[in-house]
Image (cartoon, rainbow, N blue to C red):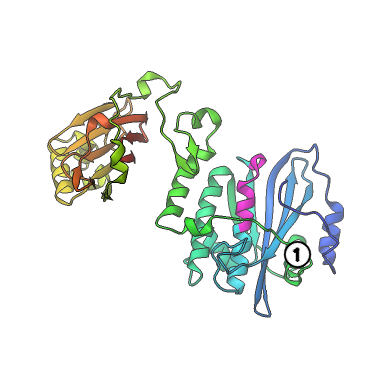
Amino acid sequence: MPGISTDLAPLSDLHPSTVAALRLCRNHVGQQIQAIHLHTDGLFESGLASWAVVVIAELSTGSFAFLGYLAGKVVTDEATRGFIGATVHTNGTAEMSAILWALLWVMQCPPLRGMSVEVHMDSTYAGGIAALTTQARANRALAQLTQTLAVIAARFAHVTFSHVKAHSGHPWNEMVDRVASAAHKGCIAGLQVDLPVKSWFQGNALKSVALWSQILAYNPEHRAAYPPQLGGRLVVTPPAHSLPARRVVELSFPVQRPREKTDALPLGQTIVFATANVLTLAPGDVREAARGLMVSGRVALLQTQFHNQGVHMVGVQEARTPGPDIRASDKYCAITSGATHRGTHGCELWINTRIPFASVGGQKVFFQPRNAAVVRSTQPHVLVCSHPYARLCA
């Protein structure tokens, strides 16, 4: 496994339960691993914080294997390698850093995809933050990144969190305590990894990463239905896929490319998004609500309300309209995925054609249906590319 050490020499005075457990461990080479246990711990002492993770494999035979450990000191300078959002040295940043590095390790290990991964910690506070059951009282940036990575890791593996009582003689909790102490004393070199954390905290980057990370967890065949990724962004190319025609809507509109001077002109862009579940916007009659947008007059009413609020794009869930199709009204262009054969589910993306979303050189830019292409359309979602100034998806 990458990024971990099995060197026990720097670990002095191991707890007797740890020594006994290590003697019982088996070699995992050639064995089937059915679960991974990550034991995390943090240490705050003399004004400095350090963290550690011990990795244990549960074999299909019922035995366990010691895979190694990773550790380091908490970094509070964003210009220093290993910075992950902590701004102070505390016990809380130490414990959360350990969980965060454990989650990062999970995501960079392809063999763990789809496997059961249990993270054990003796801090109920840090564990609650990672499990999204506790609100952070401090160190919010580090907590936000930890929670985001927990969401992403859960798309790769079956991640759970459990509490272990500290200093109770648990062999691996005692061991990770010694590893954190060794890292604190400088006996372990620690990880030296460059992460673009500063850019992660800009805008809603963390939330976007969490949402799009689901694509990374798909198998290659499923992932091939999506645009490729380059530099962390989706790159839409001319449609090239092997999906059944009935599940894909292709628009062969010519793409109008901006003139050469366009890039040099002042560009301003403002896009207002909204999402809605049509069932929640329905009248009190449950029978009418179940019909989604098929209720007479509902589309016109909702589009008028969103238009009056200056909304450029609306993602509609549970539309329950037939399709796939593209409909145009006097305010919005509606791209629909179509409902199931039972008339349920389905979603739509409404794009306003009357409110400018950008200005180039002082001239207003409006969305035009001829510049859009539906890259993928299924009942759960629609992925749309619009040229030349925007990529639209819902």
Quarter occupied by residue 6: bottom right
Up the image or down, 245 lies above or below 38; here it is above
Q: Which residue is mark 1?
A: 179
Which one is nearer the viewer's eye here, 283 or 30?
Answer: 30
Does residue 345 appear in this view?
A: no
Quarter of the rendering containing residue 255:
top left
Q: Is residue 107 magenta?
A: yes
Give the residue displayed 78% in from the left and 49% down from the top.
64
Disc 1 on helix, strand or loop?
Answer: helix
Please tell me in which quadrant of the rendered image residue 260 appears.
top left
- Give the side of residue 197 with respect to residue 11, left or right: left
In magenta, the rendered stretch is: 101-112
Amino acid type, mark 1: Val
Work out whether 365 lies above or below 88. Answer: above
302 or 228: nearer the viewer: 228
Q: Is residue 325 left or right of residue 35?
A: left
Whether residue 220 is visible here, answered yes or no, is yes
240 horizontally vs 18: left or right: left
Numbered circles on residues, count: 1
Q: Position of residue 49 (x, y in %)?
A: 65, 72
Q: Position of residue 238 (x, y in %)?
A: 40, 26
Q: Nearer the viewer, residue 127 or 363?
A: 363
Which residue occupies 54% across, 55% down?
Answer: 196
Does 295 sit above or below residue 120?
Answer: above
Could you tell whether 93 is left or right of 168 in the image? left
- Residue 325 magenta-highlighted: no
